[in-house]
Image (tube, helix red, strand yellow):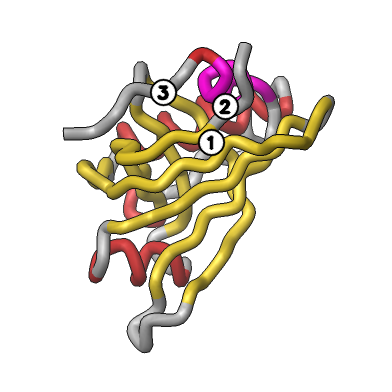
């Protein structure tokens, strides 16, 4: 069972802050990618392409870590370790892409990607370290 996101973690995730996501390569080495994030309650959500290295890694090993620094006050960053508990595909994944694009840019994406090209990961935190409120 996961742990809830703290108020400080929610505040930072809800802003237009970039996250750096670490996944595990087949040889056990880390792979890090900058991503846009949003949340659904206490779950962290990431929309990405199906042909990305993090996608291949997460399909093999659902463990994931995120570091999210608040652009207005970067230290201390939010640190989340957890696992992917759901893969969202099809039109719901496209809608996740649209929603996160609007969050970060204020606009709809110029084009909606084909549903077969997008995936959204629902992440359940096992550990959350965040600034106090």
Vertical arrangement, residue 61 with respect to residue 79, above or below: below
**Label 3 close to label 2 by CB (< 8 Å):** yes
Task: In the rendered view, tell whether residue 26 sits above or below residue 8.
Answer: below
Q: Residue at x 33, y 46 (%)?
A: 82
Cα–Cα span, label 1 and label 3: 14 Å
Decide: few, some or many residues near mark 2? Use Cα within 10 Å; few <14, some 14-19, many ≥20.
Answer: many
**Label of residue 5 in the image:** 3
Q: Which residue is mark 2?
A: 13
* Foreground pick, 5 / 87: 5
Label 3 crowd (10 A; few <14 / some 14-19 / many >=20)? many
For the magenta stretch, what is the residue range? 8-15
Residue drawn 58% across the image and 60% down it: 33
In the rendered view, does 122 fall on the left or right side of 109? left
- Measure how far apart labels 3 and 2 are at the Cα level: 10 Å
Sequence order check: which comes first, mark 3 or mark 2?
3
> CB under 8 Å between callouts 1 and 3?
no
Q: In the orientation shown, which residue stands out farthest toward the front? A: 132
The x and y percentages for residue 124 are 29, 37
* For marks 2 and 1 on the same chain, the one whose residue lies earlier in the sequence: 2
């Amino acid at each position: 069972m996961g742990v809830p996101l703290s108020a400080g973690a929610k505040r930072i995730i809800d802003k237009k802050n970039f996250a750096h996501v670490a996944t595990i390569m087949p040889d056990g080495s880390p792979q890090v990618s900058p991503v846009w994030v949003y949340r659904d309650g206490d779950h962290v959500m990431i929309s990405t392409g199906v042909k990305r290295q993090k996608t291949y890694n997460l399909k093999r090993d659902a463990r994931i870590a995120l570091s999210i620094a608040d652009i207005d006050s970067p230290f201390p960053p939010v640190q989340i370790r957890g696992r992917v508990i759901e893969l969202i595909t099809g039109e719901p994944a496209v809608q996740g892409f649209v929603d996160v694009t609007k969050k970060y840019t204020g606009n709809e994406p110029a084009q909606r990607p084909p549903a077969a090209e997008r995936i959204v990961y629902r992440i359940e935190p096992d550990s959350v370290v965040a600034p106090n409120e």
